[in-house]
Image (tube, helix red, strand yellow):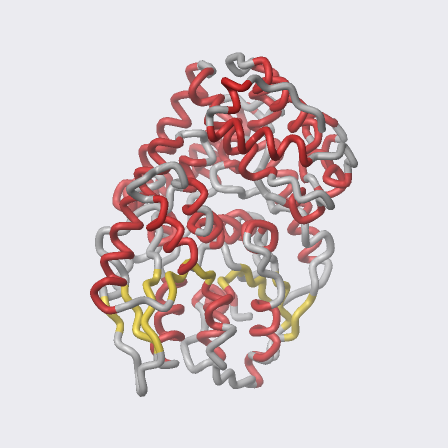
Amino acid sequence: MQTVFTETQLADSHMAVSEKILRSCVHCGFCTATCPTYVLEGDELDSPRGRIYLIKEMFEQGRAAPADIVTHVDRCLSCLSCMTTCPSGVHYMHLVDHARAHIEETYRRPLGDRAMRSLLAMILPYRRRFALALRGAHLLRPLGRLLLRSVGAPRKTPRLVDRVIAMLALAPRNLPRPAHAPAVSSAQGAKRGRVALMKGCAQEALNPRINEAAIRLLTRNGIEVIQAEDEGCCGALVHHMGKTPQALDFARANIDAWLKLKAEGGLDAILITASGCGTTLKDYGFMLRDDPAYAEKAAEVSRLAKDICEYVAGLGLRLVPKQQHDKVVAYHSACSLQHGQKITDQPKRLLKAAGFRLREIPEGHICCGSAGTYNIMQPYFAERLRERKIANIESVRPDIIALGNIGCLMQIASGTTIPVVHTVELLDWANGGPMPLQIERAGA
């Protein structure tokens, strides 16, 4: 793609990166076939190619973001399916992240939009605040149903009430108990390694059982597990809202926390059980490339970051297929895992080795509609994608749905009675751990 940028514009490192990305696009349109919003609407402006044209125009003209461009960029899920499909290697993720930061800096959103974004940025990345908010949302779930009956289905251009309804609908029916994992979990038997396990923010409040299963599985197989007390949100939630300074502050705090652990006793890896966080951690090196104090440290953390299944696949687990594990499992590959981190085979191989009968989901490359805060901010698209995903999952008639991201778990579980669990919970079960609670409750 031909671009027209001034030398002054290209002196900015962010613009220089975006210009290079824009030039790599050859207009082929392969991305449209795998873009969820284009698949739903057939609108070129709601495809990666269309958004690339809009972003190019906005950047070249050096102007504040106009409302029409904001609309179409906001509708992007950042599922990154387009990057898997693209034959030219267009790094769409970095381009759309830059566009969102530009929008945040130059565009004044309507009051309701600003209020919702500020609320999410103030609550979701902070464990204690989010845990309190969950209790409130749990009590207000009936209000969400009343509002839905009153105002009807969400609109394509979302209203504040649509977003409130979506937020309340996602509140868990059963409040999880608080997490209680120790800061250090010792390896059982001969010690084979030492890792840091990311606690996360939303996941620890929504489903602490996931990390507890990971700790049991790792320690049972000779891995010492450390959880940093001063580690917080990875920054993904605010990063995808264009709130770059806040995202980088989160990243720096985490880098300090993990490298302190590494200095104290060494680290083989930083493990993540929420793949959305994992994609961001693996991008810390890029995000902080211009920070002289953190560029090298960020790159080191990105090298250490691994998804739990990526790491466990190399441990040679003793997985014991049992009769009760002879279940049909539909494995949903989260977009952040298959497209963001290019991890596709390890979780499937592990589940098969554990004795589960794995079924491929039709349209497995299409997003479920969760995408961080997308299912709150864009409920019109998110609900349709959830329904499409669940229909595809139910077509293979599974006993269990397995996946590797808390956002996908909450999104899919809100629309089906089939138990939805994290892959590591099934691996822990097959390695001598307890039956996952969701399966026990369902009697599956």
Please give left or right for residue 341 compared with residue 120 in the image.
Answer: right
Q: What residue lies at 70% left-to-right and 27% top-to-bottom? A: 50
Q: How many marks?
A: 0
Quarter of the rendering containing residue 325: bottom right
- Which quadrant does the N terminus fall into? top right
Between residue 85 and residue 198, name the one nearer to us.
Answer: 85
Position of 380 relative to 83 (above/below): above
Q: What residue lies at 79% left-to-right and 36% top-to-bottom? A: 28
Please give left or right for residue 317 compared with residue 290 in the image.
Answer: right
Q: Position of residue 159 (x, y in %)?
A: 52, 21
Q: Position of residue 130 (x, y in %)?
A: 32, 42
Q: Position of residue 279 (x, y in %)?
A: 49, 50
- Which quadrant does the C terminus fall into? bottom right
Q: Position of residue 233 (x, y in %)?
A: 34, 45
Please give left or right for residue 36 compared with residue 174 in the image.
Answer: right
Between residue 18 and residue 368, name the one nearer to us.
Answer: 18
- Residue 147 appears in the figure: no
Quarter of the rendering containing residue 226: bottom left
- Residue 89 appears in the figure: yes
Q: What residue lies at 49% left-to-right and 75% top-to-bottom? A: 314
